[in-house]
Image: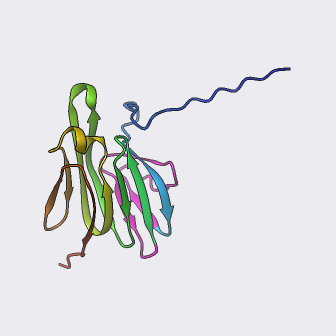
Amino acid sequence: MLFFSAVIVTSPHSALAADNTVAAITSIDGTVHLNRSSGENRIAIGFRLMPGDILETGSDGSLGLVFDDDTRLSMGPDSRLEIENFIFEPGKSEFSFIVRLFKGTAVYVSGLIAKMSTKATKLITPTASIGIRGTRFAVHVEEIKS
């Protein structure tokens, strides 16, 4: 008897219009929290993120993300980051990547958005906004005490 097995491989560039997700968690260690307007907060490797999601790592936490354009972002301990906007529609020439780092450490490696539209990518901190033109960098933001 002969059995066939099919494997469907999808590209991270595929449009996921039905679910409005924009990135996947690729690594997780220690304490990590998701704040989502729907109240969902259980995450694991492979979990899909949406614009508006706020991610927080504890003092023992770290997190790795890959966005649908292959942008890679890692968060270190005691970090807080919001995915403000992400649009990757090459067929329509529509691009936007905006994240806000409230505190902590992040390492960024640009994906296709920064290469295809040099003014569409921004990392915002409490005291500065970084326009990204296709690069790699690390940034650390001290928490501002009120």
Q: Is residue 56 placed above or below 88 in the rendered structure?
A: below
How far from the left and from the top, in percent, is residue 130?
16, 58
How far from the left and from the top, in percent, is residue 47?
48, 48
What residue is shown at x 50% (from left), y 69% (from top)? Answer: 30
Please name whichever residue, 105 or 33, is drawn nearer the observer in this view of the structure.
Answer: 105
Q: What are the residue bounds of the magenta stretch?
A: 32-60
How far from the left and from the top, in percent, is residue 114?
23, 45
What residue is shown at x 19% (from left), y 64% (from top)? Answer: 125
- Looking at this rendering, what residue extends furthest in the bottom direction? 145
Q: Is residue 106 placed above or below 70 in the rendered structure?
A: below
User: In the image, is residue 96 part of the stretch drawn in magenta?
Assistant: no
Magenta span dominant secondary structure? loop
What residue is shown at x 31% (from left), y 45% (from top)? Answer: 111
The C terminus lies in quadrant: bottom left
The N terminus lies in quadrant: top right
Q: Is residue 143 left or right of residue 30?
A: left
- Tell me the colour scheme of the image: rainbow
Please name whichever residue, 53 or 62, is drawn nearer the observer in this view of the structure.
Answer: 62
